[in-house]
Image: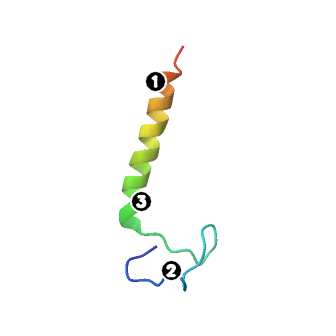
Amino acid sequence: MTKGKDPKTVGDHHTPQFLMDDNAFKTGVNAMSNLVFDYMELHTP
């Protein structure tokens, strides 16, 4: 959610009214990428 927005007035996830905080996107992508790479490393034959 964008900073300064009231959580009661914005849409839920997976709806057109949902507003994502673009500043958090980089952190989320980085975290998920690290999880994928760690999983792949642990499950490599």
Q: Is residue 16 above or below residue 23?
A: below
Q: What percent of the width, then of the height, locates residue 34?
A: 41, 39
Spatial distance from mark 3 to mark 1, Cα to Cα?
Answer: 24 Å
Q: Is residue 5 above or below residue 19?
A: below
Do callouts 2 and 1 mark residues in contact (Cβ within 8 Å)?
Answer: no
Which amino acid, mark 2? Pro
Which numbered disc covers residue 12?
Answer: none
Which amino acid, mark 1? Glu
Q: Which residue is found at the position 37% from the left and 54% from the top?
A: 27
Q: Which residue is found at the position 38% from the left and 62% from the top?
A: 24
Residue bearing the label numbered 3: 25
Which amino acid, mark 3? Phe
Numbered disc in front, either 2 or 1: 2
Considering the numbered disc 2 on the image, is that residue within a helix, a strand or a loop?
loop
Q: Which residue is found at the position 44% from the left and 31% from the top?
A: 38
Considering the numbered disc 3 on the image, is that residue within a helix, a strand or a loop?
helix
Quarter of the figure with residue 17: bottom right
Do callouts 3 and 1 mark residues in contact (Cβ within 8 Å)?
Answer: no
